[in-house]
Amino acid sequence: MTQPPATAAIAPLDGVRVLDFTWALAGPFGTMQLADLGAEVVKVEYPETHEKERGFGPYYQGISTFFFSVNRGKQGICIDLKHPEGKALVKRLAQSADVVTENFRPGTMDRLGLGYEALRRENPRLIYAALSGFGQTGPYSQYAAVDVVAQAMGGTLGLNGQPDQPPLRVGVSIGDMVGGLYFAMGILAALRARDLTGAGQLLDVALTEAQMALCENAIVRQSAFNEQPTRIGGRHPLIAPFQPYQSKDGHIVIANVKEWDLLCALIGRDDLALDPRFSSNRARIENVEALEAELNVTLATKTTAEWFAILRDTNVCAVGKVNSIADLFADPHVQARGMLVDVPLPYGLAGSLTLPASPMRLSETPAVVGAPMPEHGGDTDVVLARWLGLAPAAVAALRATSAIK
């Protein structure tokens, strides 16, 4: 693995301050994108939280690998949001922030006196970004939604899986993570809008609506043809071949065939080119089960690597190995692009863990995988001094009241 690159002279979000109240996965994943782009993300946590309660296991040297994976490059402070002095401190910090982020159930921050209306009175230029399961309004707004609920209610779960099997959750948490990406993109849009208007605003992102946005083709087909898209396994509803097929030792994806006859020749199946069932894309869609059976028989005669070598340079189709996560660590392209980086452990612990680098590659102001996850409250003194100019004695006084850790 590669080491994190040295910090660039300037990052895309240099000077942007984010006061981050997000927790679990969706919100932290979104704010981590901002940290990778150079924003100063200060993660606010509860003073009484124990290190091992900051995320799910498994734990590595006492560190939650879950928490480690989505909180790199941030600073950590601890404030009691129910303490009067803690509330006052948050309002002061909001005056110095560009963005406040939270992913509590709608109304939680309002009940604490720290919602959008309260904080924008402190700072009219503030962007207040709220991420929730169903959005800030509507009849479902108070319902909880975790990843699989977002996939279910947003439509993606119903499209995923085999036709004769129950709906299948996507293997990565797209219900959370796609919502987090829209969250980050909305914040960037709001920052740009503030450049034009001088005013902040409220950003409302719902996990379920982010999933609906992924269903654009299925939704338009429902609208245009009253078609009810459903589960079709690894196939594509409009293109064939376009799925993983069995190889001798795994699976290989073949898709977007430009020259069907030439593909048939390359895999030693000229007879398929002459078969009227497969003579056009429409014919192959109508006979997709027969096509799948024929291709599985043939592709099972060679390994995934052998087929990839035969097909990848021909420009006849899109072809891809179905990599395991372990395969990614050894892939020469992944290594050449530096897509996996070693991030040191916090708390002075020896060693590091490997994380994906940012896929956002800017030529002049690159994204940077920065410091590891913040220590619990480890930056409280530094942040309060830099953002608010508080002297050590003032910080000590706040700590003595238990408003901060």
Image: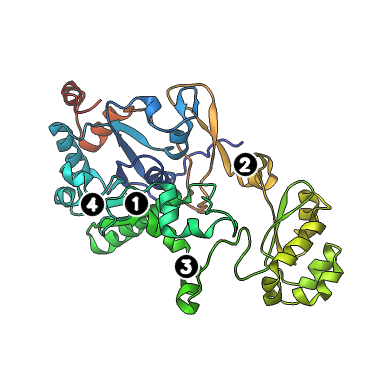
Instruction: Kindly identify which numbered label has been placed on residue 126.
Output: 4
Hey, which quadrant is residue 327 in on the image?
top right
Left or right position of 355 against 37: right
Residue at mark 4 to residue at mark 1: CA–CA distance = 23 Å
Where's the C terminus, which quadrant?
A: top left
Query: Alpha-carbon neighbours of circle 4 within 10 Å: few (<14), some, or many (≥20)?
Result: many
Q: Earlier in the sequence, mark 3 or mark 1?
A: 1
The answer to whether residue 18 is above or below residue 318 is above
Q: Are marks 3 and 1 in contact (CB under 8 Å)?
A: no
Marks 4 and 2: which is nearer the front?
2
Instruction: Kindly identify which numbered label has been placed on residue 325.
Output: 2
The kind of residue tagged 1 is Gly
Marks 1 and 2: which is nearer the front?
1
Residue labelled with disc 1: 133
Query: Alpha-carbon neighbours of circle 1 within 10 Å: few (<14), some, or many (≥20)?
Result: many
Where's residue 334, x and y in %?
64, 46
Where's residue 79, x and y in %?
24, 32
Indicate the secondary structure of the residue bearing disc 4: loop
Where's residue 209, x and y in %?
38, 59
Q: Earlier in the sequence, mark 3 or mark 2?
A: 3
Hey, which quadrant is residue 70 in on the image?
top left
**Residue depicted at x 49% and y 55%:** 157
Residue 11 visible from this viewpoint:
no
Q: Earlier in the sequence, mark 1 or mark 2?
A: 1
Indicate the secondary structure of the residue bearing disc 2: helix
Residue at mark 4 to residue at mark 2: CA–CA distance = 40 Å
The kind of residue tagged 3 is Glu
Residue at mark 3 to residue at mark 2: CA–CA distance = 29 Å
Where's residue 285, x and y in %?
67, 71
Left or right position of 238 against 136: right
Query: Alpha-carbon neighbours of circle 2 within 10 Å: few (<14), some, or many (≥20)?
Result: few
